[in-house]
Image (cartoon, grey):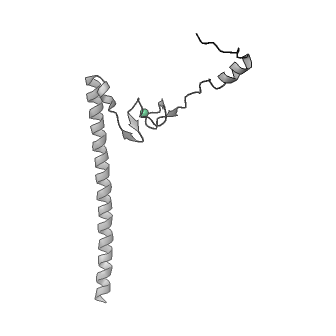
Amino acid sequence: MPHPKKKTSKAAKNQRRSHHALKPISLIKCKKCGKSIKPHTVCDGCGFYKGKEYIDMTKKLPKKERIKVKKAKEKEEKKDLKKTNKETSKLNKKEIKTDRKEGAKNVTRGDK
Ligand SMILES: [Zn+2]
């Protein structure tokens, strides 16, 4: 068996081991659900990373709850669609109004 030539002193041993301490893990909070996660990783609570869904967490749920979540999601999507439709219709109406005004001005200018 090979042996060290000299005994390492306590100081040398402690100096060598001064770098062996473990650093605490740096955690961040998920922006979606608030769970503390490692940075640059997909959240294992909601499956989101940078505002995009990468893991479908509903697959892990039992069937009844999965259906509930799906229905809730569909409802939210419908609401969003209605909102966007309303906004676009409002914008269109405004555009039409402004067009009419401009058209009327043009007409009066043309008459003179
Ligand atoms: Zn999350």
Quadrant housing the C terminus = bottom left
Q: Where is 65 relative to 105, above or below?
A: above
- In the image, 40 versus 105, the foreground residue is 40
Q: Where is 99 relative to 76, above or below?
A: below
Where does the image place residue 45, in percent across and percent down from the top left?
A: 41, 29
20 on left or right of 104: right
Q: Residue at x 43, y 37 (%)?
A: 32
Q: Residue at x 26, y 34 (%)?
A: 71
Count of numbered tags = 0
Q: Residue at x 63, y 12 (%)?
A: 3
Query: Which residue is outermost to the top?
Result: 1
Q: Residue 52's quadrant in the figure?
A: top left
1 on left or right of 111: right
Where does the image place residue 55, in percent across and percent down from the top left?
A: 34, 33
- In the image, 28 versus 69, the foreground residue is 28
Where does the image place residue 49, in percent across and percent down from the top left?
A: 41, 38
Q: Residue at x 32, y 32 (%)?
A: 56
Q: Residue 78's quadrant in the figure?
A: top left
Taking the image in four quarters, ligand 1 sits in the one at top left
Quadrant housing the N terminus = top right
Q: Residue 109's quadrant in the figure?
A: bottom left
Q: Where is 87 relative to 23, above or below?
A: below
16 on left or right of 42: right
